[in-house]
Amino acid sequence: MIQNVDVYDEGPYTCSVQTDNHPKTSRVHLIVQVPPQIMNISSDITVNEGSSVTLLCLAIGRPEPTVTWRHLSVKEGQGFVSEDEYLEISDIKRDQSGEYECSALNDVAAPDVRKVKITVNYPPYISKAKNTGVSVGQKGILSCEASAVPTAEFQWFKEDTRLATGLDGVRIENKGRISTLTFFNVSEKDYGNYTCVATNKLGNTNASITLYEISPSSAVAGPGAVIDGVNSASRALACLWLSGTLFVHFFIKF
């Protein structure tokens, strides 16, 4: 009976039975299996886009475990990366950021699993910037959305003048990836081209957005046209029904 078996107990064992005439022996080999265990794994890392990254995942076990790397931040079924202790990524892209899972498996027990997070920094790019039309005296909002890691900081300009909250009746709000420039009471002088600038430590980008004038009548024209269209159609149906009724009445009479 071997208590607390460890790997040093592995090997051949011989049982001998001594009799008067012939000694008898029996030989058995003990194989010690060890569940997989990850002993060393890379720490979370932050790199700039275009850098090279090497992740390490060292595991022990008997039999020797298979080490697999998988990218968790992609669609299911597309996350396999490599089957090796080392994961090397050259010229890393922003879509390669996220969590990477190292799994050590040798079928002795459940796999040992650990995770590493890669954060990829990249300069801003403006993904949404739309021109806006508004009537004089109404509220107008210009919106600018930018993707970046670290998160971008925003600035608004009209021509060469930087805008600030509280000046000329405007308010600037920055929430995550989106910055808005709000005019509470649009006047003629507010119309024109505005520039949204998004900046982080890796660079900056900008987009031109136009606040243009629309007449109050054109703003109402849309719904009015629909209503007029509905009324016209209703009148046409009523006329058709009346004509049919008169025809039937005339046919019965004669």
Image (spheres, rainbow, N blue to C red):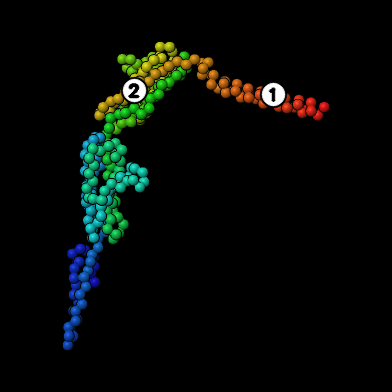
Residue with the most extreme bottom position: 21
Residue 149 coordinates in the image, percent (x, y): 29, 33
What is the quadrant of residue 8 in the picture? Answer: bottom left
Q: Quadrant of residue 157?
A: top left
Q: Residue 202 is drawn in which quadrant?
A: top left
Q: Secondary structure at mark 2?
A: strand
Q: Which residue lies most toward the top here? A: 189
Identify the image quadrant of the N terminus.
Answer: bottom left
Disc 2 residue type? Answer: Ala
Crowding around mark 2 (Cα neighbors within 10 Å: few <14, some 14 to 19, many 20+) is some
- Give the numbered dot on residue 239: 1
User: CA separation, marks 1 and 2?
Assistant: 55 Å
Looking at the picture, how far across and down is residue 189, in whole percent? 40, 11
Residue occupying image coordinates x 79% and y 26%: 250
**Is residue 187 toward the left or the right of residue 49 in the image?**
right
Side of 253 relative to 186 (left or right): right
Which comes sooner in the sequence, label 1 or label 2? 2
* Residue drawn at x 21%, y 70% as measured from the top left: 29
Q: How many marks?
A: 2
- Residue at 25%, 52% (x, y): give it: 67
- For the residue marked with disc 1, what is the amino acid? Cys
In the image, residue 145 above or below residue 18: above
Q: Where is mark 2, residue-wise? A: 207
Residue 51 visible to an observer of this rendering: yes
The spot of residue 6 in percent (x, y) is 21, 63
